[in-house]
Amino acid sequence: MSAITVREKFAYGMGDFASSLVFQTVSTFLMFFYTDVYGLSAAVVGTLLFTARTADAVWDVFLGAMIDRTRTRWGQCRPYLLFGAPLLGLCAIATFTVPDGDTQFKLCYAYASYILLMMAYSVVNIPYGALPALMTDDARARTRLASWRMFCAFSCAIVVNTSMIKLVDYFGDGDQRLGYQSTVMVMAVAGTLLFWLCFAGTRERIWPMVQPMQVRRDFRTLVAGRAWWMMALIGTCMFTAVAITNGSAMYYFRYVVGDTARAAPYFLCVGLGNLTGILISSHLTRRFCKRKVMLLASLGAAVLYASFYFVDPSHPWALNLLGYAITVISGISLPIVFSMVADTADDAELRSGRRMVGLTASTIGFAIKLGLGLGGAVTGIILTLVGYHANAVQSPQTIEGLKLIMSAVPAIGKLVVCAIVAFYPLGQKKLDEIQPLLRQARAAGA
């Protein structure tokens, strides 16, 4: 099987740059947009985020099964990038649009637009996440591809987080509603073009298997494996922590630090930290078992998150350096998680003789969405419990709550991830045993 070319690697990374334009904008700014611009309460927004991110569970499973049965001249996964990208862009614009009408109408509009956004995101992101399993069967090559993917994703995060507020001010000229809508329009166009570049520049080498549609049987095969359960739990816990820290960051800088302008350099340090961690991850996983690497990285991140509580917010460099350190350690785990999705699909194929990369990616993607939804819900609940009121002077209790959201809560999430990773069954030794068996089975089936 031919190796992945530099051109393909670049094109694949641009797909995650495109995906992150939506993901980073939503995870960092949407809750703040809903409470301080759209006009909804924190509790309502938390419920909305949780409901919307979990409501499309059936859709994700159906979509994954559909990907596994897709047969086109472009392959299984790539056609979804071509046709789904414009739809995702339109839904993102609709989500960041404030309609005219009373509170009830605006709430219904928010639910409808955000659920559609999540469904459109699945149409593009699930096949994108499944694509490495069809580009190569080399577990180490998949990890390197995932590292490059994450490098591009966090490069995009730096662009979004450092430019979003400035672009909103520029396009809105004092009108935040117009500013957010116009900024997301620009990002939607850029994201569509980048997804098309990913479609044109990648290649699927592992040919589809001819197999009847048996969604229930395939799903039972997946959940019968310990690897799938561990991956689902890891995705839920890890992205709950991500959603909590991303969703609460703007509140922290506005009300604890007292200056939203200081969010941009902090986000820059966080993005650089993630990029550094991803580069380190690539080197570590070439020498050591990625399960062990992820276990130690999660433990280190938990310690650093806990220390965030004690940082004086009046000292910007201390805040920024700690944010950098946290994301260096956290960033080591991210490429490993996404490469483990393909490994889990291989484990299921070895046990059943049926390939189900789409269903694996969609079900674990749902676990990630569940984590993002839980993170939004937890953030909204904590903000409500500590007495947060939008666009007002916050009480000492509220300030204390915002500090805990940025420190203790994600630290607990990382410790839970450590416990789960310890039980993940697919270490490097096991993966090296699986691949020759799969090649033999695929050759016999062909």
Image (spheres, grey):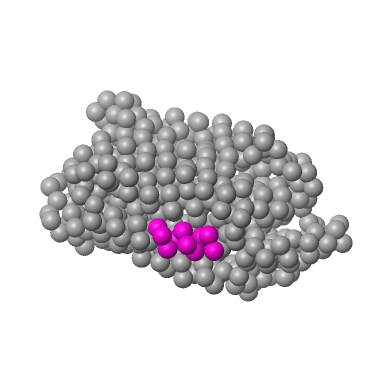
> x and y percent of residue 16 in the render?
54, 42
Q: Quadrant of residue 273?
A: top left
Residue positioned 28% across, 46% down in the render = 319
* Location of the C terminus (image quadrant): bottom right
Q: Is residue 97 left or right of residue 441?
A: left
Q: Quadrant of residue 209?
A: bottom right
Q: Nearer the viewer, residue 286 or 207?
A: 286
Q: Position of residue 195 (x, y in %)?
A: 58, 37
Looking at the magenta stretch, what is its main secondary structure?
A: helix
Q: Is residue 408 above or below residue 391?
A: below
Q: Is residue 291 above or below residue 11?
A: below
Q: Position of residue 170 (x, y in %)?
A: 31, 25
296 part of magenta stretch: yes
**The magenta segment:** 292-301
Provide residue 248's location: percent of width, then percent of height: 30, 51
- At 62% from the left and 46% from the top, the residue drawn is 145
Q: Is residue 64 left or right of residue 235?
A: right
Does 286 appear above or below 2? below
Q: Is residue 108 visible?
A: no
In the foreground, 32 or 52: 32
As for residue 117 lying within the magenta part, the answer is: no
**Residue pushed farthest front?**
287
